[in-house]
Image (cartoon, coloured by chain):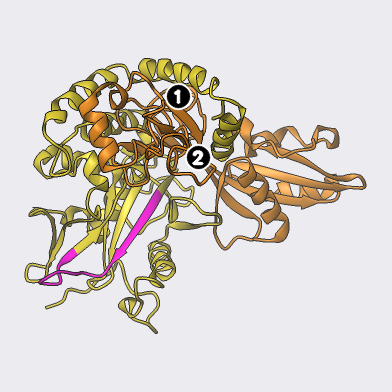
Chain colours: A yellow, B orange
């Protein structure tokens, strides 16, 4: 028997979510997510210019975690403990897919290194339009999952190997559950995902989470695996080198930056002008 | 968003902010991705060498002649020896330049560390200013007020503005528009016409 759902619902009942094909579903999917968050009393912001974030959602919560997933304290104190509420922001990157595969159960997606920021308030929202499920995972939980289940992680170089698609997120229609390589992801699903999303610790201990995510990123990204693309003799050399460069990243990087700038400045005006032409969109970076 | 508010939004986009909107006509959310340690902007579309962290220098190199070329031209082979040009890491002490096995494999599989298909470049990991690896988002809920005299401003400021982080007041006077950028807490001191300036100053809060 299908259980009734409170979140998400189809806010556009005149059309089925899977009536769209992959080329025209981006806009409607983002709107679908936004309207669903409005229905549970979050304030929703849509991008005005092109950014890597598809929606920002916001609301007032109790810092002691008493706020329900569909409750917005709207500047009022918590009715449970009378503590003043405060406003939280969550930054959402949406991935929408139909389920594909032999049993139509696979949610294939790609994530690149540019998708991993060190801010724990950044969330990946995997929207399965066939099952009408939102899987909401913070960048912290995502990286932590792979650190804990290390064998399953896609090491950094594999982000670009093959087609880069991750096909390990699966839906089991018999058990009505989501798993990643056999490990349950139902804790990130729909209302449970929203409850994780409004975790006040991400705001209260923001700096600590940023440092933790940075460590996770560097431990997981800077581990080279030769795979089938490279010969195994370079694996040890690369991993030893990465260990050195990651021992004091700030100091080592500053030295490299100075040395590189000196070298680039010797390359002639035409080349320097060309490089600065590419750097113009990165304010603060120039030769 | 009304046209006057949109104009403020575009000003902030030109200064490196991203803008997010709701149904409100004279308000928006300004957002930046910055270094946690020094607040310099952070760019996820800027790439670094996976091995040493050097930024993409956007240049070609001929490994045979040891010469560098601008990437702007369409030449893909060295004009002197016709060898394939590569987008290498500029750091001479990077493993991709010092270890023959590593460099051979990178340059055989790809056209260098920064080739578009290469897995040896990675999105920005180090701050372009201080080298920190920590980054975060900042947001400002911005409300825009259009006024042609101080009375209109004072009337606007009587509203409950506590849910906004920043108020941008645009005062239209004969010689053009003057701006005042302030936090709601600063309203209590009152607004004087001579305190307006020529530009929106959101960066002082960033």
Residue A105 counted in the magenta span: yes
Quadrant for the N terminus of chain B in the image: bottom right
Image x and y of residue B191, in percent: 78, 37
Residue A122 position by quadrant: top left
Across and down, in percent, residue A246 comes to 28, 22
Percent coordinates x, y for residue B40 in the rendering: 52, 29
Badge 2 density bin: few <14, some 14–19, many ≥20, Cα 10 Å: some
Range drawn in magenta: A91-106
Residue B152 location (% of width, % of height):
81, 50
Residue at 66% of width from left, 56% of height from top? B26
Which dot marks residue B71?
Answer: 2
Residue farthest to the front? Answer: B81
Q: Specify whether B27 is left or right of A77.
A: right
Quadrant of the rendering where the C terminus of chain B is positioned: top right
The residue located at (85%, 50%) in the rendering is B148
Q: Nearer the viewer, residue B105 or A54?
A: B105
Residue B79 or residue A207, whichever sits in front: B79
Outermost bottom residue: A14
Q: Mark 2 lies on which chain?
A: B
Along the viewing direction, whichever of B115 and A42 lies nearer the viewer: B115
Q: Identify the image quadrant of residue A192.
A: bottom left
A79 relative to A76 in the view: left or right: left
Q: Going 39% across and 42% down the picture, which residue do you hit? A: A82
Question: Magenta includes A158?
Answer: no
Residue holding disc 1: B37
What residue is drawn where x is 92% and y is 47%? B174
């Amino acid at each position: 028997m299908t259980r009734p759902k409170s979140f998400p619902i189809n806010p556009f009942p005149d059309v089925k979510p899977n009536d769209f094909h992959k080329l025209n579903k981006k806009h409607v999917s983002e709107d679908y997510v936004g309207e669903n968050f409005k229905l549970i009393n979050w304030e929703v912001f849509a991008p005005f210019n092109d950014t890597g974030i598809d929606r920002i959602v916001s609301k007032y919560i109790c810092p002691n975690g008493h706020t329900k997933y569909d409750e917005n304290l709207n500047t009022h104190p918590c009715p449970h403990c009378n503590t003043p509420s405060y406003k939280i922001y969550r930054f959402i990157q949406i991935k929408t897919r139909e389920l594909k595969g032999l049993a139509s159960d696979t949610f294939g997606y790609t994530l690149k290194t540019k998708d991993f920021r060190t801010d724990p308030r950044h969330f990946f929202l995997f929207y399965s339009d066939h099952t009408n499920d939102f899987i909401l995972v913070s960048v912290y939980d995502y990286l932590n999952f792979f650190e804990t289940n290390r064998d399953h992680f896609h090491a950094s170089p594999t982000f670009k190997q093959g087609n880069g698609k991750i096909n390990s997120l699966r839906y089991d229609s018999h058990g009505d559950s989501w798993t990643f390589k056999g490990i349950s992801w139902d804790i990130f699903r729909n209302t449970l995902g929203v409850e994780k999303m409004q975790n006040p610790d991400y705001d209260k201990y923001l700096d600590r989470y940023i440092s933790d995510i940075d460590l996770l990123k560097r431990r997981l990204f800077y581990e080279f695996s030769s795979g089938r693309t490279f010969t195994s003799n370079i694996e040890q050399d690369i991993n030893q080198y990465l260990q050195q460069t990651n021992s004091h990243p700030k100091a080592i990087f500053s030295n490299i930056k100075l040395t590189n700038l000196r070298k680039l400045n010797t390359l002639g005006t035409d080349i320097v002008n060309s490089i600065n032409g590419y750097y113009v969109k990165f304010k603060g970076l120039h030769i | 968003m009304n046209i006057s508010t949109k104009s403020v939004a575009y000003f902030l986009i030109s200064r490196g902010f991203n803008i997010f909107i709701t149904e409100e006509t004279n308000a928006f959310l300004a957002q930046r991705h910055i270094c946690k340690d020094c607040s310099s902007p952070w760019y996820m579309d800027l790439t670094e060498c996976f091995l040493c962290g050097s930024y993409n220098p956007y240049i070609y190199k001929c490994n045979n002649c040891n010469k560098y070329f601008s990437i702007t031209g369409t030449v893909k082979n060295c004009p002197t020896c016709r060898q394939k040009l590569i987008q290498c890491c500029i750091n001479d002490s990077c493993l991709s330049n010092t270890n023959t096995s590593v460099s051979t494999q990178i340059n055989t599989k790809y056209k260098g560390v920064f080739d578009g298909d290469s897995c040896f470049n990675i999105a920005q990991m180090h701050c372009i200013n201080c080298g920190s690896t920590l980054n975060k988002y900042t947001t400002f809920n911005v409300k825009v007020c259009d006024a042609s005299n101080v009375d209109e401003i004072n009337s606007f400021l009587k509203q409950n503005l506590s849910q906004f982080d920043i108020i941008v007041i645009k005062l239209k006077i004969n010689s053009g528009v003057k701006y005042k950028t302030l936090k709601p807490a600063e309203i209590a001191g009152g607004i004087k016409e001579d305190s307006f300036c020529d530009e929106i100053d959101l960066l002082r809060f960033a």
